[in-house]
Amino acid sequence: MSVPRVLFLLFASLALTAATRVVTSRRVFHAALWLIISFFGVAAIYLLLAAPFMAGVQLFLYIGGVAVLTVIAIMVTKGVMRLGTRVSNEPGTSLLMAVVLFGVMVWMIVSIPWQQLPLAPPGETDLAALGEAMVDPAGYLLPFEVVSLMLLVVMLGSLYLGKGR
Amino acid sequence: MAVLGVPLSWYLILAAAIFCVGVYGVLSSRNLISIIMSIELMLNAVALNFVAFARFVEPGQVTGKILAIMIYVIAAAESALGLALVISIWRTENTVSVEEISELKG
């Protein structure tokens, strides 16, 4: 086993175990904390993928934004703290569906002859190319503006919904 | 090759596993906040897929990362709006259980 593989297995098991705990924790608050650990594991995987910028975005946006927002939402809705996540309708059927889906996905993944080595070494100007592509009219300027507009609309909508009557 | 790197399929299988855990969470949860957290797990797995593809099958290594960033934006919007809805429902119905929120049921 080479070092990258050992690191990958370590972080992958961390992310996967934490993800499993998210959906099996009895308390919603514990699930939110496990969610943060799972995001940390995926951020470490991004570092293995030679994408340190994406790892930073993962830390800032997912952990600093999404997960903390979830924790705050759990805290302000008094009484959810002691509410269980489980005791669901049909846990067995849900598990069966998830396992079947996973099996089909793994079967598809292993049956395709993927590229074995990374196509290009991580470039020095990686981040600059990313930024330029995002504001290039021939690149991704339109999606960039559309998600900006979507964020604005979502912000207004959340304010309206959260304002109360 | 001297140093054995991690093959692409490992990343894809990890992403598939996290995604399926999220699917299980969405299907089996009774509580709106847990469902939102499971959706975040699924979106995160998809972003991981895109970053892995950007590393392995794309010479420029840009498109996959931009798609992943778009997913981040959408995930942030989804969680903000979803949690605002949850808080709004909590205020009016005093519950976040999907079985008790049945006002729209015909």
Image: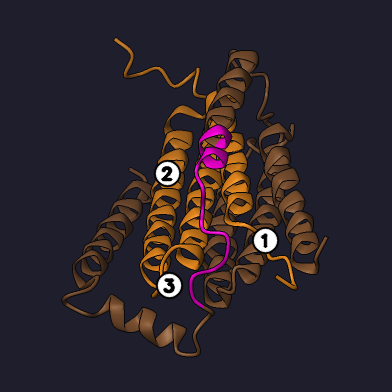
Chain colours: A brown, B orange
Question: Who is closer to the viewer here, B37 or A77?
Answer: B37
Q: Disc 3 sits on a residue from what chain? A: B
User: Can residue B31 be seen here?
Assistant: no
> Which element is circle 3 on?
loop
Q: Which segment did they paint magenta?
A: A106-120
Residue located 49% across and 18% down the image: B100
Q: Which quarter of the image is occupied by the C terminus of chain A?
A: top left
Question: Badge 3 local density, few (<14 within 10 Å), some, or many (20+)?
Answer: many
- Do tag 2 and tag 1 residues touch (Cβ < 8 Å)? no
Look at discs 1 and 3 and give the one toward the viewer: 1
- Do tag 1 and tag 3 residues touch (Cβ < 8 Å)? no
- Asked if A69 appears above or below A130 in the picture, the reply is above
**Are marks 1 and 3 in one subunit?**
yes
> Which element is circle 1 on?
loop
Residue located 74% across and 31% down the image: A26
Q: In the image, what residue type sits under mark 2? A: Gly
Residue A86 position, x and y percent, is 67, 25
Q: In the image, what residue type sits under mark 1? A: Val
Q: Residue furthest bottom?
A: A124
Look at discs 2 and 1 and give the one toward the viewer: 1
Residue B101 position, x and y percent, is 44, 22
First in residue order: circle 1 vs circle 3: 1
- Residue that numbered label 2 is attached to: B82
Question: Badge 2 local density, few (<14 within 10 Å), some, or many (20+)?
Answer: some
Residue B61: image tag:
3
Q: Is residue A73 left or right of residue A146?
A: right
First in residue order: circle 2 vs circle 3: 3
Question: Who is closer to the viewer here, B72 or A139?
Answer: A139
Q: Quadrant of residue B20?
A: top right
Q: Disc 2 sits on a residue from what chain? A: B
Q: CA distance from mark 1 to mark 3?
A: 17 Å
- Residue that numbered label 1 is attached to: B6
